Image: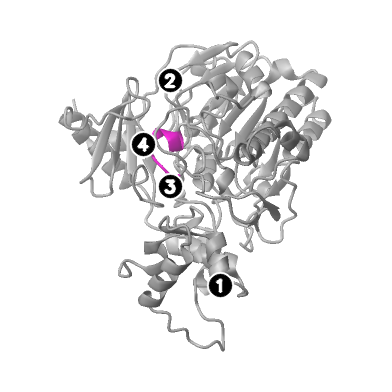
């Protein structure tokens, strides 16, 4: 029987119903969510990596459960993190890509920050008596954005972040674990919730000298990436050791995951890369050799390599040790209701979440989700794996499609985790049903961001607008096309930031100008982005 639109609306918009009747825990567990950046599913030694060693993450897996069908809800940073915070699909807040400079957000139809009035996991826990903290990356706004709400507006008691708003004090890239350990020590006698959002393995790669020394026997590309992974793994170890030292390991739920799949690798090494948001210089994307563990696609793709990420949970006495769960489709929007249930926190009656309470799954029971899962992607749409704009999973089936549904692929993930076999022609009835679900879901999304979350900069600053008094530049598509051919020195069909800087050597604001062209935020300019559709 095919679901009606009314039934779909009820599924999507009805108040979250508990799927597991759990008794309140005897004592509130501490909760720590460690969220890495661009860390591939295959970047664990316990997931079969051929040379990387991740002893602390392997320890977490031995002492907990490895959930192998966990998905984030967008293949890039900011929307993925928005889903974790709110338990809602990020598109409900018009957060479609990473938060960039206000002018670029404005062009993309995005706000300049996550709505602070949105329901958030830290706020729910804080109101229930938890001490709450956020350490490490933020990126729920952008460092060039003025007036963005600070972490306390979202329910945090304490924070130390990078990739925050303009004028915010910036924490160091390697400080998150140290700050977490200090917070644990001070708050050991009360329940706490900590978001620890690590920089690893995002570019620029800024490995410690100690980790570089450990991998000096490898070639330069492998050495840098291995050192970065080691730094991230060591951060996990620091947090686990702090819990043990304070006698809190047995009453703390620890999770490790990643915001999306691994980054693409540049074809050659360029000059060191500067990240203005984090105010650091480090190695560029040539060293991004993260692995998906055989999954199709990478970061920015709706195929599994872009959205299926590691998810390991340790919760002594509750989550089985040394187990693997390869049957439950668990997602980022499930975290809010599930963690609130684990903490004995009753969600407000008016909270309308997109996720499910999967506490029973955390506790080792064989469960399956009831709701379909939806993705939307408005960024890079190149071949071979970045073309899908919508995706839906229901049960074992996953459909990816273009906006107009003229191109689709259907995969049965239980049989084909690599999404190698397109079964659309064999199951037209499944294609029709899932297409209808995806289109109906998209119809529930807002057409524009909340104006309260748009900086005045978005309205007053237009990309490439001439400064007052400046001469008009008559740069035609033909001129841009010639420049593109000249600056694309390796002839790979893209211009990197380094190639762009070399082509305009000595000019001002090159980083910002590059970002204005880089509509999909992938760190490189396609001919269409730089020249325009007519400038072939």
Q: CA distance from mark 3 to mark 1?
A: 39 Å
Decide: is 11 above or below 89. above
**Label 3 near label 4: C-beta < 8 Å?**
no
Which residue is under mark 1? 504
Q: Which residue is more in the foreground, 241 or 12?
A: 241
Q: Tag 3, which secondary structure? A: helix
Q: Which residue is more in the foreground, 106 or 27?
A: 106
Q: Earlier in the sequence, mark 3 or mark 1?
A: 3
Which residue is under mark 2? 328
Q: Quadrant of residue 206?
A: top right
Q: Residues within 10 Å of mark 1 (few under 14, many from 20)?
A: few
Q: Say left or right for 350 vs 418.
A: right
Quarter of the image that includes the N terminus: top left
Decide: is 329 above or below 447. above
Q: Say left or right for 22 vs 415.
A: right
Q: Earlier in the sequence, mark 1 or mark 4?
A: 4
Which mark is nearer the camera, 1 or 4?
Answer: 1
Q: Earlier in the sequence, mark 2 or mark 4?
A: 4
């Amino acid at each position: 029987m095919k679901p009606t639109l009314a039934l779909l609306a009820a599924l999507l918009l009805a108040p979250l119903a508990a799927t597991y009747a759990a008794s309140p825990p005897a004592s509130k567990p501490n909760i720590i969510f460690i969220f890495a950046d661009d860390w591939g599913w295959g970047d664990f030694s316990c997931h079969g990596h051929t040379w990387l060693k991740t002893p602390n993450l392997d320890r977490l897996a031995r002492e907990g459960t490895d959930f192998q069908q966990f998905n984030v809800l967008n293949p890039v940073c900011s929307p993925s993190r928005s889903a974790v915070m709110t338990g809602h699909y990020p598109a409900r807040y018009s957060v479609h890509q990473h938060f960039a400079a206000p002018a670029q957000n404005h062009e993309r139809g995005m706000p300049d920050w996550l709505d602070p009035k949105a329901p958030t996991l830290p706020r729910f826990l804080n109101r229930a008596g938890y001490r709450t903290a956020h350490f490490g990356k933020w990126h729920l706004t952008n460092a060039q954005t003025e007036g963005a709400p600070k972490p306390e507006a979202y329910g945090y008691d304490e924070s130390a972040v990078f990739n925050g708003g303009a004028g915010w004090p910036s924490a160091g890239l390697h400080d998150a674990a140290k700050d977490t350990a200090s917070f644990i020590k001070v708050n050991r006698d009360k329940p706490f919730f900590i978001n620890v959002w690590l920089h690893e393995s995002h570019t620029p790669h800024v490995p410690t000298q100690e980790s570089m020394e450990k991998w000096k026997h490898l070639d330069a590309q492998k050495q840098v990436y291995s050192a970065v992974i080691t730094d991230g793994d060591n951060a996990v170890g620091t947090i686990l050791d702090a819990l043990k030292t304070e006698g809190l390991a047995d009453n703390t739920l620890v999770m490790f995951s990643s915001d999306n799949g691994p980054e693409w690798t540049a074809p050659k090494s360029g000059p060191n890369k500067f990240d203005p948001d984090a105010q650091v210089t480090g190695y560029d994307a040539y060293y991004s050799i993260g692995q998906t563990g055989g999954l199709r696609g990478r970061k920015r793709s709706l195929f599994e390599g872009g959205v299926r990420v590691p998810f390991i949970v340790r919760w002594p006495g509750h989550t089985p040790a040394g187990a693997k769960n390869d049957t439950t489709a668990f997602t980022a929007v499930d975290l809010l209701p599930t963690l609130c249930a684990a903490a004995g926190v009753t969600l407000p009656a008016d909270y309308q979440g997109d996720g499910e309470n999967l506490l029973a799954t955390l506790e080792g029971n064989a469960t399956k989700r009831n709701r379909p899962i939806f993705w939307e992607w408005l960024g890079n749409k190149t071949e071979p794996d970045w073309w899908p704009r919508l995706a839906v999973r229901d049960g074992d089936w996953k459909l990816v499609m273009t906006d107009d549904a003229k191109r689709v692929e259907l995969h049965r993930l239980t049989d084909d985790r690599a999404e190698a076999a397109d079964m659309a022609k064999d199951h037209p009835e499944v294609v029709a049903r899932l297409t209808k679900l995806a289109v109906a879901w998209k119809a529930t999304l807002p057409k524009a961001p909340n104006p309260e979350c748009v900086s005045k900069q978005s309205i007053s600053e237009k990309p490439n607008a001439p400064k007052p008094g400046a001469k008009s530049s008559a740069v035609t598509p033909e001129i841009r096309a010639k420049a593109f051919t000249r600056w694309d020195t390796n002839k790979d069909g893209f211009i990197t930031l380094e190639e762009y800087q070399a082509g305009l050597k000595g000019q001002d604001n090159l980083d910002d100008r590059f970002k204005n062209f880089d509509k999909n935020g992938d760190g490189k300019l396609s001919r269409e982005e730089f020249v325009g559709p007519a400038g072939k």
